[in-house]
Image: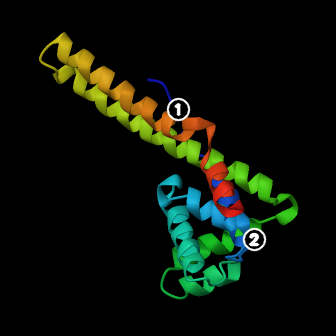
Amino acid sequence: MIEIVNHSLELEHRVLEGLMHVEIHTAPIARKAFLALTPDCFYTPLNRQVFQLIKRAYQAQEGFGFVDILVIIGQGNDHLHDHVNWMMDEYSNLHVTDSKLGSDIEALQEYSTLRQQVAIFTSSSLEIPRCANSRDAQQLVADSVSQISSLSYRKAKHGSSSFEIADNFFEG
């Protein structure tokens, strides 16, 4: 069986740390990030929860820096609190730029798309042995390939990434 790397914990942490470094809801990179990212972009449940807290604070036009998120978590969720605290301790803002954060966000989206594509492939490969005949199996494969390619096509359509679309939106 082929093993595919479908996530990067380091990348997830860089994106979350980058967002918490920005911490201001009016920053253009924050707007772009929240237009582009969804919780599904994060593979690990803890990182997904942290993103949801950051996004909620962003939507409420509140601060979403490290300390802000720790305050939101508060008491009662020690595991999540420890996770954000660890991220804050490990954080180094030496290389945080809008351009780097933008690249990391796009890479995170690519991992998310890859996970969706692998899920479609895996599901269809498990269904093939259950097909009544070769024609049904071929149709299943064709449908799966179509779904997989449409995930990539949506992103590449017209040569625009979601960041380019967001840039155009904010520039008028």
Spot occupied by residue 92 in the image (x, y as percentages of width and height): 82, 64
Q: Which residue is pictured at 60% across the width and 76% down the height?
A: 58
Residue name at image x 61 percent, y 82 percent: 61
- Residue 127 position within the rendered picture, expressed as x and y whole percent measured from the top left: 23, 27
* Location of the N terminus (image quadrant): top left
Q: Confirm or deny contact between disc 1 and disc 2 (CB under 8 A).
A: no
**Quarter-wise, where is residue 14 in the image?**
bottom right
Residue 145 seen in render: yes
At x 48% / y 24%, what residue is drawn?
2
Q: Position of residue 90 (x, y in %)?
A: 75, 65
| Left or right: 164, with 93 as reference point | left
| Residue where numbered disc 1 is placed | 4
Residue type, mark 1 in image: Ile
From this view, report whether residue 78 is shown above or below residue 127: below
Three-letter amino acid code of the residue under disc 2: His
**Front one among 79 and 120:** 120
> Is any part of residue 43 visible from this angle?
no
Q: Of the residues under marks 1 and 2, which one precedes in the sequence?
A: 1
User: Which residue is farthest front?
Assistant: 172
| Residue at mark 2 | 21
Q: Residue at x 30, y 28 (%)?
A: 124
| Mark 1 or 2, closer to the camera | 2
